[in-house]
Every structure is written in C-alpha cells, then in structure tokens.
Image (cartoon, rainbow, N blue to C red):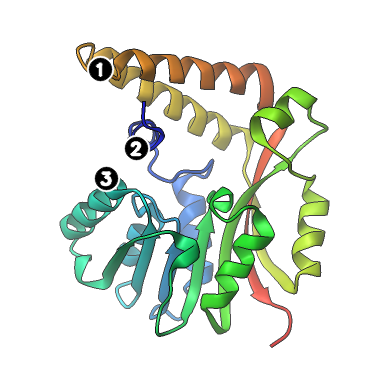
C-alpha cells in the first residue's frame, strides 16, 4: 500500500501529523504570528493543517505550502476553499529541498518532516535559506526520552536526548524562544487516532484492494508503539530565532 495513502487515511481525525493537540498548535502559531500579517512557508506541508489554522485564525496572513504528495495538496486546496482562505494560500507540488521563492518568509514551518531533509540540522539549513531577517522558524522533531534499545533505533532512526538536541540547535546559531514537549496524553491521542483511523477505514472498505494491507499496517504500527517506543520516544516543537544576523 502506498505510504502516502496510508498517511492520508491515518490522519483523517488528527490532521496535524505530530503528537500535538489543537490548543498547543494554536498557541505555537499565535506566538509565531505576532504581527498578524506575516508571510508563512511550510516545508513539507502535507494536507496543510498548520497553514489552514494559521490562515483561519489570522486574516492578514498569507502562506505557501510545499509537498510532493498530490493527494494531500488537493485536499489542502479543497479545505482552504471551504474555509474561505484559498486566495491567501499558494501550494507547490515539488520537493521541499528544491523549492525557491523570490521573497523571504517571516515564519518558516517544518514539523515532523525532518526526514525529508536528512535530519534536524539540514531542515534548519533549508528553513534559514527562506527566512526573512528577524523571522521565526517553527520546527518539530523527535528525541529520546530515555535510552532506546538497538531494535528501536533500527525502527525509528538515530536521535539524541532532549538536552543534546537543543544543544545542537543552539550551536548551529539558533535561540529557542518557546518550546513544547509533547505529553504522553498527546502521544496517546495521536497514536490511537493514527492506528484507529487506518483500521476503521480498512474495516469499512473490505472490498478495497488495500484493505488488508491497511489493517496490517495499523496492527504493526500499534505494536511498535505499545511494545516499543511509548514513553521512550519524545517529540519537541520549538520556536527559533537566529542568534546572530
């Protein structure tokens, strides 16, 4: 089953593709959009959940979203039109690493998309290239809450603990001005929604050729979470400013 289709179905009831609740998303956006007329860029926007919230809550904001997933971008455009914010949203179907723009952005987002750039610091380098002077980067990525097993590292990849993660960011020339560490409640809500939405779709569409694969993917993901990284793998979302000009 296509990985992008799995993700779209799994995020049906939790469109923000990260373990963050709606109140936290809006708080982070509110701190990022201090003037209310910012130009915002989301590198790896998916279905545009962050941008739709930003545009809906801040009528003076304009936004660009970049992603390779045609279906996700189509859904983002449809939702933007339904919310009446489509005239302030521009979507680009291309690799976020290759995106160029004639103007800088006041806020650059990339939450849960560091894999597309090869890690956290390369993600920040990509964001820096688009950031206006005095602008803000909103980035979210994983870290180890406690020492992982080798098997977990094989499944999820290489990460560091929270302190080391922040130290690397600071050494790269950034200053955190706000951060949110996802709670176990946010993680549980996200993972139950992810696995449950996918399983529910499979059970509701038994004739679909992908039904069996979707049910299996939900079961595998649920087992990896409950028997593996629950309580061990964390997620931090940070608002960052450049330390020096």
Q: Residues within 10 Å of mark 1 (few under 14, many from 20)?
A: few
In the structure shown, which secondary structural element does the residue marked by tag 1 occupy?
A: loop
Name which residue lies at 37% across and 63% down: 65
Contact (Cβ within 8 Å) of mark 2 with mark 1: no
Above or below, comparing residue 90 to residue 49 in the picture: below
Residue 48 got which mark?
none
Contact (Cβ within 8 Å) of mark 3 with mark 2: yes
Name which residue lies at 37% across and 60% down: 94
Q: Which of the marked residues, 2 or 1, is nearer the chain's N terminus?
A: 2
Residue 54 shows in the view: no
Name which residue lies at 32% across and 18% down: 200
The Cα–Cα distance between marks 1 and 3, rounded to whole angstroms, is 18 Å
Q: Quadrant of the C terminus?
A: bottom right
Q: Nearer the viewer, mark 3 or mark 2?
A: 3
Q: Position of residue 150 (x, y in %)?
A: 79, 26
Q: Quadrant of the N terminus?
A: top left
The Cα–Cα distance between marks 3 and 2, rounded to whole angstroms, is 8 Å
Q: Nearer the viewer, mark 2 or mark 1?
A: 1
Q: Position of residue 129 (x, y in %)?
A: 56, 76
Q: Which of the marked residues, 1 or 3, is nearer the chain's N terminus?
A: 3
Above or below, comparing residue 214 to residue 94 in the picture: above
Q: Residues within 10 Å of mark 3 (few under 14, many from 20)?
A: some
Q: Which of the marked residues, 3 or 2, is nearer the chain's N terminus?
A: 2
Q: Position of residue 216 (x, y in %)?
A: 43, 14
Residue 209 got which mark?
1
The Cα–Cα distance between marks 2 and 1, rounded to whole angstroms, is 16 Å
Q: Which residue in the structure is indicated by mark 2? A: 8
Question: Looking at the image, how many numbered discs can be counted on the residues?
Answer: 3
Q: Which residue in the structure is indicated by mark 3? A: 71
Q: Nearer the viewer, mark 1 or mark 3?
A: 1
- Residue 234 shown left or right of residue 205 in the figure: right
Above or below, comparing residue 169 to residue 194 in the picture: below
């Amino acid at each position: 089953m296509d990985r992008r289709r799995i993700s779209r179905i799994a995020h049906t009831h939790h469109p923000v593709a990260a373990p963050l609740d709606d109140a936290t998303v809006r708080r982070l956006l509110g701190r990022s959009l201090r003037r209310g007329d910012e130009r915002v860029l989301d590198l790896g926007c998916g279905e545009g959940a962050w941008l739709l919230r930003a545009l809906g809550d801040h009528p003076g904001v304009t936004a660009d979203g970049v992603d390779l997933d045609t279906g996700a971008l189509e859904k983002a455009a449809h939702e933007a039109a339904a919310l009446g914010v489509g005239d302030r949203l521009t979507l680009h179907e291309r690799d976020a690493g290759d995106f160029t723009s004639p103007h800088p952005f006041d806020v650059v987002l990339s939450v849960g998309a560091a894999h597309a750039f090869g890690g956290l610091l390369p993600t920040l380098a990509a964001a820096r290239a688009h950031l206006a002077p005095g602008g803000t980067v909103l980035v979210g990525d994983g870290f180890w809450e406690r020492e992982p097993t080798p098997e977990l590292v094989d499944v999820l990849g290489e990460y560091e603990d929270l302190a080391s993660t922040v130290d690397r960011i600071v050494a790269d020339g950034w200053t955190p001005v706000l951060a949110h560490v996802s709670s176990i409640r946010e993680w549980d809500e996200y993972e139950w929604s992810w696995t449950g939405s996918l399983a529910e779709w499979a059970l509701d569409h038994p004739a679909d050729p992908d039904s069996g694969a979707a049910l299996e993917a939900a079961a595998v993901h649920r087992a990896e979470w409950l028997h593996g990284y629950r309580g061990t793998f964390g997620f931090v979302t940070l608002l960052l400013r450049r330390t020096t000009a």
